[in-house]
Image (spheres, grey):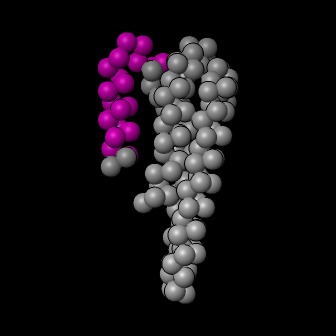
Amino acid sequence: LEMWYNTILVLLTGNMKNAQIALDALSICLNINGWELMISVGFLGATGVRVANELGAGSARRAKFAIANVVITSFFIGFVLFVFFLFFRGNIAYMFTESRAVAGAVADLSPLLAFSILLNSVQPVLS
């Protein structure tokens, strides 16, 4: 579902004024969001194994502790990335492009990207 959502966003972005710049900026933001999602999905896999092992051993208290630990860790990483993208929002795009117009568009989208990263850092872990 998320892949379809991203595809629809790209298609709708093509209808905007300055579509090339908007599409480039959106692609950069989606790429960064995907990188952060990989961290959270990695925590999801590790947590699933840990919780299953603890429940298999009959230790529900340790399983709850493992869940709380990974939620706090994932949120902390999301918060660090949130602050990072807000602080360096004018420079992040230059990892991907040399265009000032695209970098400006990414800088405008960076607060939304930062909030998305903060909220999406915990969601996969709780799945």
Residue depicted at x 53% and y 40%:
118
Left or right of 13? Residue 102 is right
What quarter of the picture does the C terminus occupy? bottom left
Q: Residue at x 54, y 75 (%)?
A: 61
Front residue of 93 and 42: 42
**Residue 58 in sight here:** yes
Does residue 55 lie above or below 107 as drawn? below
Task: Determine if residue 42 is in view.
Answer: no
Question: Magenta: predominant secondary structure element?
Answer: helix
The answer to whether residue 51 is left or right of residue 16 is right
Q: Is residue 94 above or below residue 123?
A: above
Q: Position of residue 63 (x, y in %)?
A: 54, 73
> Which residue does the image show at 55% across and 87% down from the upper left?
57
In which quadrant of the rendered view does residue 100 lie? top right
Residue sitting nearer the eye, 106 or 100: 106
Residue 49 sits in quarter? bottom right
Q: Is residue 43 magenta?
A: no
Question: What segment carries the magenta color?
Answer: 3-21
Q: Position of residue 125 (x, y in %)?
A: 50, 58
Residue 97 at x, y percent in the picture: 62, 25
How many marks the image carries: the answer is 0
Of residues 102 and 1, the one nearer the viewer is 1
Query: What's the residue at 48%, 18% (across, down)?
Result: 21
Residue 31: image location, x then y, percent: 53, 39
In the orientation shown, which residue stands out farthest toward the bottom?
57
Which of 1 and 66 lies nearest the eye of the viewer? Answer: 66
Q: Is residue 40 left or right of residue 9?
A: right
